[in-house]
């Protein structure tokens, strides 16, 4: 009881501590974890804004110490922006591996090495002339984060945060990690339920939907250029593979599981694995009649999956479209033309695709017609 009281007192004392987290790369798939984690420790999280050309130009230019894809370089703008906010700790995790919903013969859930090392590489740009973190009284914390090995998380997070939060205990971090995972699980569950609602609407109204195969950070308007939103303007619901429903009754009807070993054996990269699984889902679900593939600078980690994903999707007659080499420049005119062309094909072929897929699956489960 005394221990809980002391922990509560610590939490109240830490309410004034503000932790700045750049909204970049794999934070897009793990943000609920960090909110739950720091809330458990009694600290307030402050995120940077979405990526934008103004943010990058104002805070990031001249800070880049390597040549890389824009999603990595954009981190400089996020860090620079947070340095101008009222924060005490700048928390930029080096995420080595990610949590994953896939099961079966998955070798690992690793991240791109450039993505993992981005915090250290970009940090150097803020130290080359002077220590801008120290000058502003901000403590820079960048722990190694292996989500794929959750039993190791408390150790690395405690070691990373201890120098910045002197009264922190290991036991607190263990509990905070549990709260973080609970927060992430709750968020993912709510998003999957929302996706199922959308799919039910498609079934009820016999309307086609689109599925986006991309990395979670392409949800960032400054990285993905809101291409998904362009299709919504034409009345097409858009879903993202990482929040597709994974209810057993649905997967059984589609004839798929959470295993990808039948189509992908090099299953070590988290986003890559899940993109391949998303392609399988899209190829089976009748009312997903088109897939939109997004990538930045022909990402080297994604390269091996372009052809397999396309073949899986098109094996059922589902339409496959790709927007590649996305960078900081948004070619609004050419995007609009591409979208209009894709919409034409969707309107022309969607109903035939739905009928063809349904003929292979049989009766629609009652759970989809609620």
Image (cartoon, grey):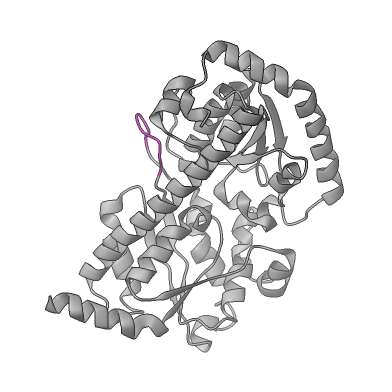
Whole-percent x, y for residue 95 in the image? 43, 56
Which of the two residues, 124 or 21, is positioned nearer the viewer here?
21
From this view, report whether residue 205 is shown above or below residue 151.
Answer: above
Which of the two residues, 36 or 160, is positioned nearer the viewer here?
36
102 part of magenta stretch: yes
Extent of the magenta region: 100-107
Q: Residue furthest front?
A: 370
Give the tally of numbered discs: 0
Q: Is residue 121 visible in the rendered structure shown here?
A: yes
The prevailing secondary structure element of the residues shown in magenta is loop
The residue drawn where x is 25% and y is 64% is: 175
From this view, report whether residue 16 is shown above or below residue 318.
Answer: below
Q: Quadrant of residue 325?
A: top right
Quarter of the image with the N terminus in it:
bottom left
Q: Is residue 125 visible in the rendered structure shown here?
A: no
Which of the two residues, 43 or 233, is positioned nearer the viewer here?
233
The residue drawn where x is 59% and y is 64% is: 75
Q: Is residue 60 left or right of residue 144?
A: right
From this view, report whether residue 181 is shown above or below residue 299.
Answer: below
The residue drawn where x is 52% and y is 14% is: 361
Whole-percent x, y for residue 158 in the image? 29, 68
Whole-percent x, y for residue 163 in the image? 33, 78
133 part of magenta stretch: no
The residue drawn where x is 28% and y is 62% is: 154
Whole-percent x, y for residue 283 in the image? 58, 23
Q: Is residue 127 left or right of residue 269?
A: right
């Amino acid at each position: 009881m005394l221990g809980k009281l002391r922990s509560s007192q610590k939490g109240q004392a830490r309410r004034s501590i503000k932790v700045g987290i750049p909204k970049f790369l794999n934070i897009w798939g793990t943000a609920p974890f960090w909110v739950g984690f720091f809330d458990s420790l009694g600290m307030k999280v402050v995120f940077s804004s979405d990526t934008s050309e103004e943010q990058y130009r104002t805070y990031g230019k001249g800070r880049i110490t390597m040549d890389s894809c824009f999603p990595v370089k954009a981190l400089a703008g996020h860090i620079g922006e947070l340095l101008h906010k009222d924060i005490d700790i700048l928390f930029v995790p080096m995420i080595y591996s990610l949590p994953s919903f896939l099961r079966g013969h998955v070798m690992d859930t690793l991240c791109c090495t450039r993505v993992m090392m981005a915090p250290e590489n970009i940090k150097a740009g803020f130290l080359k002339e002077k220590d801008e973190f120290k000058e502003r009284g901000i403590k820079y914390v960048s722990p190694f984060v292996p989500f794929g090995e959750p039993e190791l998380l408390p150790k690395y997070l405690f070691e990373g945060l201890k120098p910045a939060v002197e009264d922190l205990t290991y036991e607190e971090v263990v509990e905070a990690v549990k709260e973080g995972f609970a927060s992430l699980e709750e968020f993912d569950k709510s998003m999957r339920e929302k996706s199922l609602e959308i799919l039910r609407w498609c079934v009820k109204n016999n309307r086609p939907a689109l599925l986006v195969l991309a990395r979670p950070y392409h949800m960032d308007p400054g990285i993905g250029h809101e291409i998904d939103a362009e299709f919504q303007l034409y009345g097409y619901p858009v879903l993202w593979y990482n929040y597709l429903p994974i209810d057993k009754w649905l997967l059984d009807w589609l004839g798929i599981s959470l295993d990808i070993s039948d189509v992908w054996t090099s299953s070590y990269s988290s986003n890559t694995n899940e993109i391949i699984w998303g392609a399988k889902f899209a190829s089976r679900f009748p009312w997903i009649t088109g897939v939109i593939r997004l990538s930045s600078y022909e990402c080297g980690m994604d390269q091996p999956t372009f052809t397999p994903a396309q073949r899986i999707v098109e094996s059922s007659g589902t339409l496959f479209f790709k927007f590649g080499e996305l960078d900081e420049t948004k070619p609004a005119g050419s995007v609009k033309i591409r979208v209009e062309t894709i919409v034409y094909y969707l309107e022309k072929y969607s109903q035939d695709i739905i009928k063809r897929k349904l003929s292979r699956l049989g009766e629609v489960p009652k759970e989809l017609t609620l």
